[in-house]
Amino acid sequence: MKHLLPALAAAALLYSCSAAPEIVMVQVDPMTKILPEAVAFLPLKDTTETAAGAHAEFQIAFRCESALEDITLSCSSLESDDSAIEILRCGLVGLVGIGSYATDPAHDVIHSASGLFPDPILTDGPWKIPGGQATSAWVTVSVPSDAKPGVYKGTFTLKAKTGGHSLTRIVPLVLKVWPVVLEETSLLTVNWCFDFAECLRHWNAGKDVEPFSPLYWEYMKDMADALREARQNVSQVPVFDLVGMNRGEDGKWAFDFGKFNEVVRFYEKEGLLERLQCGELGHRIAPVWTGGFGLFVPDGNGSYETLEISDPRVKEFYTAFLPAFTANLRENGWYEKSWQKVCDEPVDANADGYRKVIGFLRGIEPSLRVMEALQTTKLTGAMDVWVPQLDTWHNNYDFFSSRQRAGDEIWFYTCCYPRGEYPNRFIEQPLLKTRAIYWMAFKYGATGYLHWGFNYWTGDPYGYADRPGTGTDLPGGDCWIVYPGYHKFERSIRFEALRDGIEDHILLTMLRKKNPAAAESFCNRLVFNWWVYTTHPGEFRTIRHELLKALSE
């Protein structure tokens, strides 16, 4: 027997080496960001719930000590006794470096030891994951508006190879659909989206795309599908990049609105034109934040200059252009839904100069209606739709409320600022902050929300999610919330939170019609004030559960 012991031990060792490595898989809250260095996962305790006409997500975190190769993910439809809901999206949550962190971080900023953060939802497998790295899979469900209330069940399946073995792991998914049907959103939203050459190349595997070619319109259709899923209903369309502007032999200006009209009609056809924001007409003359503003004037070489309004070339051009542009909007039935962006983000130091620009333009076209992102209150009479940065809105809330009572619209925006404890959508922030932006819109009564960066892809979007060469001015995640795939737009987990936040806003608005006090109470439990709100996923699920329950009664 003693001689057998070494042989038995060797056989046991050989067996242990040949056994398939264990993989840990746990369904976790989709509001949780799974960092690659995670070694433990907090299981989701609550049933995933939503309304008919809304979305729901599942996140499955997993980790294996050995490398996983040839990973494929799939998900069955979710079925009840007599109905089924198809899966909208099933993918792997990819990791990106953020490049630049935002300065003045909040107390709950997420720190990644690896420097990598989860964000893009990748849908083109198979994938390979190093041993010991935590990763998550993501499943998105779009519940039809006519879905029957009840409990729907399905399965998520992961297949992979590791250590010379093939493995299959299955996780059950359960979704409860409440007897609540989501209405259309009353919140106006716009994310500025881009079709410049570098964006097109990122989408087309590095190859150029000819503007207004069939491939260009395929890009635009992919972008429109993403915008519509995000429940965007306002589109910004450039003016100087699309309108043909030429001086004839007689010295008179002539304008070709063909391309501008083609793009506007495209957004209209895609259901993204409840409002039209016409692109800016001017900018700061000097690259100084407090500098004065000027207006664009074509230079005759296919570009344009930024000139003081006192320059006679400015008056000559706008006397011809503005009436023609307004007439084009009226002829196409767009004037009543259009607002003009003039010079982006005026501040106190240059507000007087901005007012003079608006006065100059209205002296030519009195019907000009202005909508501007801004950081000042000194524009009464010049502004029709105020879009203050979130902290500007906070610090001057009484003023903006008085403008609402006077008949002006009040939106708000976030971008590379504000920072600190304010909610934003930087990648290193808890995911619930992106969603809470829309609860804040409900709490404080904003008409709309604007963000500048939907797909401003530059550099290496999957390597570093900031804009190279800008320092900390444009933190990781500020420039885009979707990623370029090959002839498609890949969503991100922040995109999903953005869309779901708008759907939460709809639910709160629906409840306000039934019980205003209850709607306010639910909102106040998530958003205490401008700086304090819960980022606890479990607490958020409880609030949303009670919100759905109140709407179903």
Image (cartoon, grey):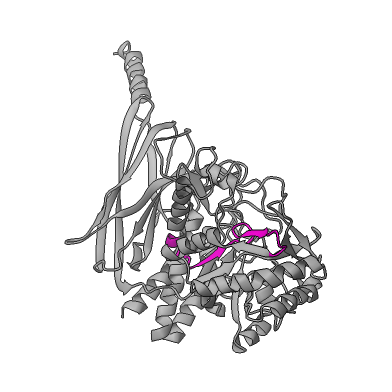
Name the outermost residue toward the front. 250
> In the picture, residue 365 is in which quadrant?
bottom right
Q: Main secondary structure of the magenta part?
A: loop
Q: Position of residue 428 (x, y in %)?
A: 59, 53
> In the picture, residue 397 is in which quadrant?
bottom right
Q: Please state which of residues 488 and 412 is positioned toward the viewer in this rendering.
A: 488
- Residue at horizontal 76 percent and vertical 71 percent from the top: 315
| Residue 236 part of the magenta-drawn span | yes
- Residue at horizontal 33 percent and vertical 27 percent from the top: 165
Work out whether residue 418 can be spotted: no
Q: Where is residue 170 in the image (x, y as percent from the top left)?
A: 30, 44
Magenta region, residue range: 228-252
Question: Where is 202 relative to 221, above or below?
Answer: above
- Looking at the image, residue 342 sits to the left or right of residue 350; the answer is left
Name the outermost residue toward the left. 82
Q: Position of residue 163 (x, y in %)?
A: 38, 26
- Residue at horizontal 62 percent and vertical 80 percent from the top: 367
Q: Please state which of residues 308 and 470 is positioned toward the viewer in this rendering.
A: 308
Quadrant showing the C terminus: bottom left
- Residue at horizontal 81 percent and vertical 65 percent from the top: 291
- Looking at the image, residue 313 sits to the left or right of residue 435; the answer is right
Q: Please state which of residues 44 and 48 is positioned toward the viewer in this rendering.
A: 48
Question: Where is 491 relative to 450, above or below?
Answer: above
Name the outermost residue toward the bottom. 406
Work out whether residue 386 can be spotted: yes
Count of marks overlaid on the render: 0
> In the picture, residue 403 is in which quadrant?
bottom right
Q: Please state which of residues 231 and 502 is positioned toward the viewer in this rendering.
A: 231
Q: Where is residue 48 in the image (x, y as percent from the top left)?
A: 35, 61
